[in-house]
Amino acid sequence: MGNFAPIALFVYKRLGHTHQVIEALKKNELSKNSELFIFSDGYKNDEDREKVKTVRQYIRTIYGFKNITIIERDNNFGLANSAIAGITEIIDKYGKIIIVEDDNFTSKYFLRYINDVLSFYEDEKKVAVITGYMYPIKRYLPPTFFLRGAANWGVGTWKKGWDLFEPDAKKLLDELRKRKLTKEFDLNGAYPFSKMLEAQASGKIDSWTIRWHASAFLEDKLTLYPGKSLVRNIGFDTSGTHCDSGNVYDTTLTTEPVIIKEIPIEESAIALKEIERFFKSIKPNIFKRIANKWRNIVKRWDV
């Protein structure tokens, strides 16, 4: 397999996080064979100007990839618009993509896993997304499994997956309600995805991932998950105004490669039950965090 997917990395002003993410990607065996596209969003205020400038100075020194292309935005797109524009640009040219944000710290097996899955399920219409992240679940999970919808935090997709994206949150929300799917979309009440979509529709948050998740969910498409995580989100620390410690999403990276084998192309009842159990176990904490962060969700870049 030599046709490796390009990597799109989205950065803003978090130098320390960006450096960690790059160093982790460089430890992947396929980094030297992979094209890296770095999308640097423009600063939104004078306070951010110097931090954005510092990140841009750093990303110009990066090496260790087949080729590096830096796209520096003159204006501030915001997290969602920056991602949507960048993903669309790469997908239209290459037909597939690996998406990493500046707080997605990856296992050294991450690029191999995503590329293997992109090749394995390329012609499977039901499969739309691959994610490298898995919640810190202590009970048994299959080595790989499917769940309905899309995902974030270190993902891969094809044009067939990204073409599902519907930017109109209200349209998505109305369709979920019309088809009486909000409870199912919310993992049977375990996680308030529909409330996030509501917040997006009313302009309280600006999230591309909740819209992609709803888009894929309504089309009955699947995301492949690993039983053990290949991605850690390092953005929930105390270094940012809107970040806190005690991250309930923190997980341990797998120390072994993920072997891709043929499995049923259907949602895993076992995995779904365990993920519902996980969210219910952290519900008091997670709902408080969500309430505090929805209004400024894009500010998890503010570090």
Image (cartoon, rainbow, N blue to C red):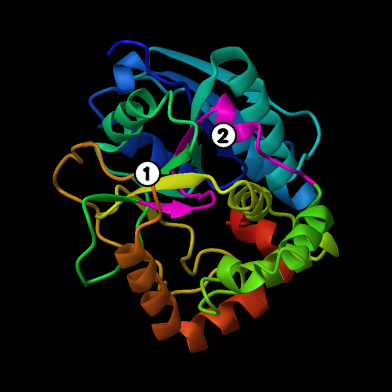
Report helix, strand or loop for mark 1.
Answer: loop
Please give the name of the residue rendered at 37% of the width and 44% of the height, measured from the top-left corner. Answer: 265
Measure the C-alpha gap from mark 1 to mark 2: 15 Å
Q: Is residue 212 above or below residue 3?
A: below
Does the image show residue 99?
yes
Quadrant in the picture for the N terminus: top left
**CA neighbours of label 1 inside 10 A, class few (<14), some (14 to 19), many (20+):** some
Question: Is residue 231 placed above or below 193 in the rendered structure?
Answer: above
Q: Indicate left or right for 187 with 85 as reference.
A: left
Looking at the image, which residue is at 55% across and 79% down? Answer: 189
Residue farthest toward the left in the current orientation of the protein: 256
Q: Amino acid at mark 2?
A: Gly
Residues rendered magenta in the picture = 146-167
Mark identifier at residue 161: 2
Which mark is drawn over residue 265?
A: 1
Residue 275 x/y as whole percent: 38, 69
Inspect this view and state whether residue 60 appears. Answer: no
Label 2, secondary structure: give it. Answer: helix
Residue 154 within the magenta-colored segment of the rendering = yes
